[in-house]
DNA sequence: CGCGTTTTAGAGCAGACGATCTAAAACGGG
DNA sequence: CCCGTTTTAGATCGTCTGCTCTAAAACGCG
């Protein structure tokens, strides 16, 4: 009944995500976004509202695309302990593979955009999901005897969460395998779980 | 031989640090800085060069003022193990005490300013010092039998570093004592070190 | 084929940005 | 007591910011 849109939403959201991921919210201009999304400013504002709303959509896109898929991927591991190890291996490889050292958009946003109450709640909710994932899978690993019960699944999960976030901070300034894998492996070893490879090329 | 400066450098650097700490580099304008530093733009540019150089000076000020002093403070603890625990207790209290949830300027800068090569090297050097501190004190705690030797002092230190950074990310969006102290305590417990208090008011 | 509706394109809005300019002001040395 | 030097103050530079405006374009419906 009206003129149809010329853009694919997932495609332009992906482009916007790339911009925000590489540059952060403040440092990314609407002109940069327009160019990378291959849309005019008017179309962007018509479709998404304003820059902040676009950012939220791009962040949601990132979370669904990157985080949720990574969690889903390791759920299929043979044992819960192996899943935790695989998760960290994934994070370390991802951190080292990116020549731009963009880290994790969720972490970057948590640091940059936490003054925005609405954004902060969305980020907190996502971190909650992360924590719940670790808690569930760590409890399972404790039940099978893979993981130590020296700490509760609750605190162990919080520790794993902090470690992932810390690795994602470190990789932005010191993308060094020994450093990132060492941090992950100390946590894994102390929990009684298998380590991720350190020397030579990544597994795969 | 010339007109003397009307400002005290430490004072205005402190004001600049507060601005950047609360808002980040990009989101802090030179007008904001001028107002908080009680200087005119011309004086700021005459004294510090440009906004970026001022930021570096403010970051150095933060590191000397906050980080180095915190490390120095715990060096006087009765045992190396107690020093590690005290350090984490300090970080958690600091994180929860700030109603603005500004986190750590070093972490914030690592995430926001890592695209600037010169800044990145400065940040990496500072993180190195952090890691070295943890390595040294953890090795000492292992030597006294306080800490486990299940992981090397190198990897254990990397793990502690990642945990601190992770806590500093978490406190920006979820300043919750159970979460932050839980993450710290799991790491401490698994290393064989004393925990930090969780329930009720802080020790002190 | 108009008609109503939505999306395009591209110019352009007011304001904020980082940075600088011109002078006046405030010193110490000769 | 003027001179050389540095720091002040305040206006202002050109540019970029997020965002919006006016039209033209592209559809489905009657």
Image (cartoon, coloured by chain):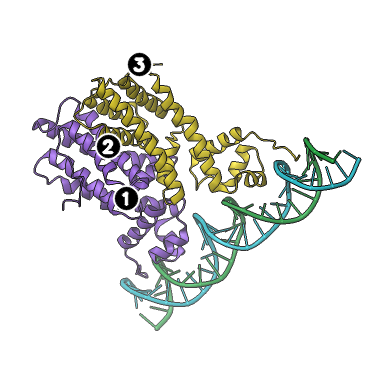
Chain colours: A yellow, B purple, C cyan, D green
Q: Is residue A174 visible?
A: no
Where does the image place residue B49, in percent across and percent down from the top left?
Answer: 43, 55
Q: Secondary structure at mark 2?
A: helix
Residue A132: image x %, image y %?
Answer: 35, 34
Which residue is under mark 1? B60
Q: Is residue A148 above or below residue A28?
A: above
Name the secondary structure under disc 3.
loop
Q: Quadrant of residue B118?
A: top left
Using the image, tell me which numbered label, if any, was put on residue A78. Answer: 3
Mark earlier in primary sequence (2, 1):
1
Distance of label 3 from label 2 (alpha carbons): 31 Å
Element type where label 1 sits in the image: helix
Asked if one can make out residue A54 in the rendered structure from this viewpoint, the answer is yes
- A61 with respect to B74 (left or right): right
The residue at the point 60 percent across, 48 percent down is: A49
Q: Which residue is mark 2?
A: B161
Chain that bears disc 3: A
Residue B78 spot, x, y in % from top left: 8, 43
- Residue toward you, A122 or B110: A122
């Amino acid at each position: 009944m009206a003129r149809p849109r010329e853009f694919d939403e997932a495609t332009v959201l992906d482009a916007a995500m790339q911009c925000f991921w590489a540059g952060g919210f403040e440092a990314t201009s609407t002109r940069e976004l327009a160019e990378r999304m291959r849309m005019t400013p008017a179309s962007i504002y018509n479709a998404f509202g304003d820059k902040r709303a676009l950012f939220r959509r791009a962040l949601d896109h990132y979370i669904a695309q990157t985080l949720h898929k990574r969690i889903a991927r390791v759920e299929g591991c043979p044992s819960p302990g192996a899943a935790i190890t695989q998760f960290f291996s994934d994070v370390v490889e991802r951190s080292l593979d990116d020549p731009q050292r963009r880290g994790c958009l969720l972490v970057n946003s948590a640091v940059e955009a936490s003054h925005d109450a609405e954004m902060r709640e969305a980020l907190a909710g996502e971190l909650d999901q992360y924590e719940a994932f670790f808690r569930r899978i760590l409890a399972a690993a404790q039940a099978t005897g893979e993981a130590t019960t020296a700490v509760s699944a609750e605190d162990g999960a919080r520790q794993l969460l902090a470690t992932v976030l810390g690795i994602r901070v470190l990789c932005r300034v010191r993308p060094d395998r020994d450093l990132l894998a060492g941090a992950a492996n100390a946590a894994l070893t102390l929990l009684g779980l298998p380590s991720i490879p350190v020397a030579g090329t990544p597994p795969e």
